[in-house]
Image: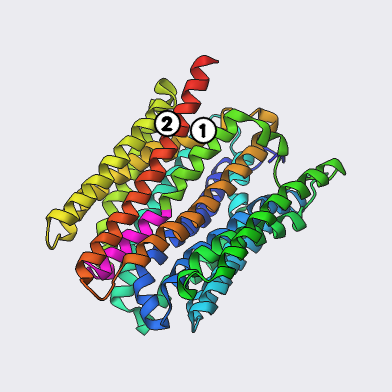
Amino acid sequence: MHQIVSPAIDQTRRWWVLATVVAAQFMFGVDAFIVNVALPTIATELKASAAQIEAVIAIYLIGYASLVVTGGRLGDIFGTKPTFIAGVLGFTLTSLWCGLAQSGPELIVARLAQGATAALMVPQVLATIHVLFSDEARGRAFAVYGIALGLAGAAGFLLGGLLVSIDLAGLGWRAVFFVNGPCGLAIIAAAVWLVPSAPRRAGTKLDIPGAMILFLGLLGVIGPLLFGRDVHWAPWVWLVMAAGVVVIAGFLRFERRLAARGGMPLIDLALLDDPAFMRGLGAVFFFFFANLSFYLVMTLFMQTALFFTPLQSGAAMVPLALTFVIASRHSAARAKHRGTLVLIEGCALQLVGLAAIALTVALVAHPSIWVMMLPLAVFGYAQGLVMAPLSSAVLSTVSKASAGSGSGLYGTTTQIANAAGVAVIGAVFFALHGQESGQTDSDHLALFAALACVALSIGVSAMCLRWMRAAAVSA
């Protein structure tokens, strides 16, 4: 963002502003993980199919990815403060709708709305930090932001398991959504009081048609992957997917025509002609393709095959989240000296973690949560080695003039990859999971197949990073 705010804001007050906007980011991060732990309970109580369970995760990401750039531009047009407050209010209300849902389809629609409002809220967080911390305190401010992101995972897993297990006020799984109510209201109150108004950025234009075309295209490609098994992969499923691909191709043509007419496209088309940046986006796509899908598969497997309680499943994931935070704290410094090599090493260590998880499940008949914690912690540490410096490595190939557009395209790619991974790897898992003959064997086969897909995706990501490194050395 290119907004300029008066530096007259009280130095103490800006740290309270930081706490307010980071709290919103923390709530968003917690929500990404808290739902995973509750999914088996949601499926049982709402009688939701496997496809609907996957869609609860994927549709949220599709809604967010389609509108996150638009959300950032709305902040430029109307100011970050009112847009942030509107986003938090919308996220809070849609969270309550999720908690009140009476069926799988209703929960899916509510999650779509929740993802759309998150796209309004989240871009204003970094915009506010960028504006208020332009001095030597900038590093500390972003460190606080990074720590909050990391701890959100641990809090989400643990809080999700705790809320489902204790059945707070008889709410069961609904509490994982209702908890956003008081949190959201507190953030809104603090924002009204603390967050300064920022001048609007002149010349910013919305590309609503582009956002809608992108949404329809993603829905056309990913939706059939989610629901194809429910309709026995009928021929029309493949036709819908083909139509989705055509719509996405049409989206790129629409964006080029919009740019030719002097409009402001959703994405910076010049970036698509940058080979280094596109290789980086390839690494980003495949890395995040394996991201949320891994958590979906593991939390489902632990509860349905290992018979962990929701609290035990959440607790088993906490060391993973904590080692992720530890790795994130020092990986950026290592990346300055070793470049993309540290990212490749992180991918290799992730593969080691996946192999350790598979061996643990294969060799230990009834692993306890303590046994599962160790290989999961290895995977989490490796993931932290990659995720923290990945954005810096990829965006370093982009000129400063295109930094905002590059960041937007990076963020959109991560969410599309997450949604696609949930659809594809989730479909593989559910296709083999819980079959009547030899259920225990099929549960393990489902996990191994899903982990193999995750490993393949991480391997492709490492190859893309290697190409980036080779290009950088030759340059």
Residue 218 percent location from the top left of the image: 61, 58
Question: Which residue is denoted by mark 2 in the rendering?
Answer: 332
Dot 2 and dot 1 residues touching (CB under 8 Å): yes
Magenta stretch: includes residue 83: no
Residue at the spot 51% in from the left edge and 75% down from the top edge? 107
User: What span is colored magenta in the figure?
Assistant: 292-310
Looking at the image, residue 463 sits to the left or right of residue 94; the answer is left
Residue 141 visible in the snapshot: no
Looking at the image, residue 169 sits to the left or right of residue 203; the answer is left
- Give 41 or 456, whichever is nearer the viewer: 456
Residue at the spot 66% in from the left edge and 62% down from the top edge? 216
The three-letter amino acid code for the residue at tag 2 is: Ala
Q: Quadrant of residue 352?
A: top left
From this view, report whether residue 27 is shown above or below residue 462: below
- Give 329 or 237, whichever is nearer the viewer: 237
Question: Please, what is the dominant secondary structure of the magenta stretch?
Answer: helix
Q: Quadrant of residue 422?
A: bottom left
Question: Which residue is denoted by mark 1 in the rendering?
Answer: 392
